[in-house]
Amino acid sequence: MARSIDLVKDSDGQGSELRAGSKKISIAFWGGGMGQFRDVQTFARAANEVCSIEELSGLLASAVREIGFEYYALGHHVNVVTGMLLQIGNYPEAWMATVRAREYISDDPVLMACQTSVAGFRWSAVATLLSLSKRQEQILLEASRAGLGDGFTVPVHIPGECAGSCSFAVRAGASLSDATLPAAQYIGCFAFEAARRLVRSPAGGMRARERVVTPALTSRQLDCVVLVARGKSDGDVAQLLGISAETVHQHIEAAKRRFGVATRTQLVVRTLFDNQLAFQDVVSR
Amino acid sequence: MVHIVDAANRPLFDLELDHMHCDRARAFGGGHRRNNHGADANRDIDRFDRTDTIYLLESDRGSRRHLASLRLLPTIRPHMLTTEYTHLCESTPPSAADIWEASRCCVSPDVPFSEQSRLRALLRTAIAEFGAFQGIRHYISVTPIHLLPEVMAAGWDAKPLGLPQMIAGASMGALLFTLTSGALREARDRLACQMSVLEFSAERAT
């Protein structure tokens, strides 16, 4: 049976209640200044108790307003492994329709900036994180026209899982204070973990087969895959690692079996995708 | 295997510990070294690096080169959060016999990126095992915020002790971590290892 969500503002305007079915989670947000830390504590506790994505969505929408934002978007950037895409948010619907119609998601500059930064960043700094194409400049311009002002994104990189993020934005024309960013960082982290927990739970829709932990490669297998990704042959890898070519072949084949892939190219892609191998390992060393 | 280095076996790990202090100096730089008690600028040594301090340490068996380590301090005695990083806590950090502080968590800068995440997972597994054997239920730590999702995904319940602040160019936060049930299994699954990662032998394996 679906649990209903009801966010209710208290009479003094200082608190909210998240009513979910028969369970009531009282939320008392404290607003800016010294209250931001209490907001974070409150959110972290409540996020740990929510039982559905819908509850989390309501909680997050309430929390972001309390710390000075209007909009949020949380999700995995892609998840071809499980066929499951976690995406929640309250961006303006007209903007989301534009994103879908013009397929902006594939080269969204904020999502692409997450690939180059592990730390949270303001959207106004995106141009310092990557070289914007004309299309990406257009995306930022259209987002602003659609009502999204400046924003702050918390990238989420968990080894063995696909990348994700939690973004917060103010209305177009509103100012974004640096003072709100520490609380946003924590709320982004706790919200993402809550969403991740819900999606991975049986009630969250992920089947047991899909909850299997991503296969981890051994150190030696990773050593071999890194060198293969750099274009080395089995003979080259053997020489570099001081082992036989046959042993290299066995490591690569074992790694392929662990991921259930047929080719070396698939193996490299999967290890990059799962954060077991980084682009820095392949291209800059 | 991750070694437990303490007062009793410390002389056996002199080389590994020296490498550890060098790696810490490179990893943390000046911003974190508020109270460097070492005369050598190339080594990060502070007042809590005592002869009876406990370290969890992973090293290369052949070269004895330090790969990854962290330092464990009981919170019933002075520690980093009550001395160096008080500004990261909204109030006095929790202190009890079953709460220890994990600090100076360091992966050698020489280790490739892909191996770094495996070593962090190895240390998380080791600290969970150490806690289980020593009756430690919680750890407090100053943690880079960008690593918080990774730690929580590994099964640690996190409670912030204050808002994060920028330290040496990174956003850092003081947190209380509690090991949840099943976290040790999850940690071992991620390492593809179902056995203890801690080396309980008093001697250094060669």
Image (cartoon, rainbow, N blue to C red):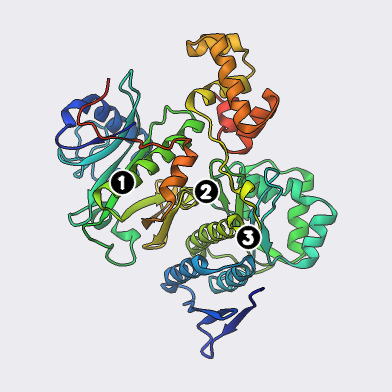
State the CA–CA distance, disc 2 to disc 3: 28 Å
Mark 1 or mark 2, which is nearer to you? Answer: 1
Q: Residue at x 21, y 57 (%)?
A: B97
Q: Are marks 1 and 2 on the same chain?
A: no
Residue B20: quadrant of the picture: top left
Read off the chain for label 2.
A
Q: Amino acid at mark 1?
A: Ser
Residue under numbered circle 1: B103
> Would residue A36 be found to the left or right of residue B101 on screen?
right
Crowd rating for badge 2 (residues with CA inside 10 Å; few <14, some 14–19, many 20+): some
Q: Are marks 2 and 3 on the same chain?
A: yes
Residue under numbered circle 2: A119
> Would residue B182 be found to the left or right of residue A50 on screen?
left
Q: In front here: A172 or A215?
A: A215
* First reached walking from the N terminus: tag 2 or tag 3: 2
Q: Give coordinates of residue B40: x percent, y percent.
A: 22, 30
Q: In front here: A279 or B186?
A: B186
Residue under numbered circle 3: A204
State the CA–CA distance, disc 1 to disc 2: 20 Å
> Would residue A74 be found to the left or right of residue B48 on screen?
right
Q: Amino acid at mark 3?
A: Gly
Mark 2 or mark 3, which is nearer to you? Answer: 3
State the CA–CA distance, disc 1 to disc 3: 36 Å
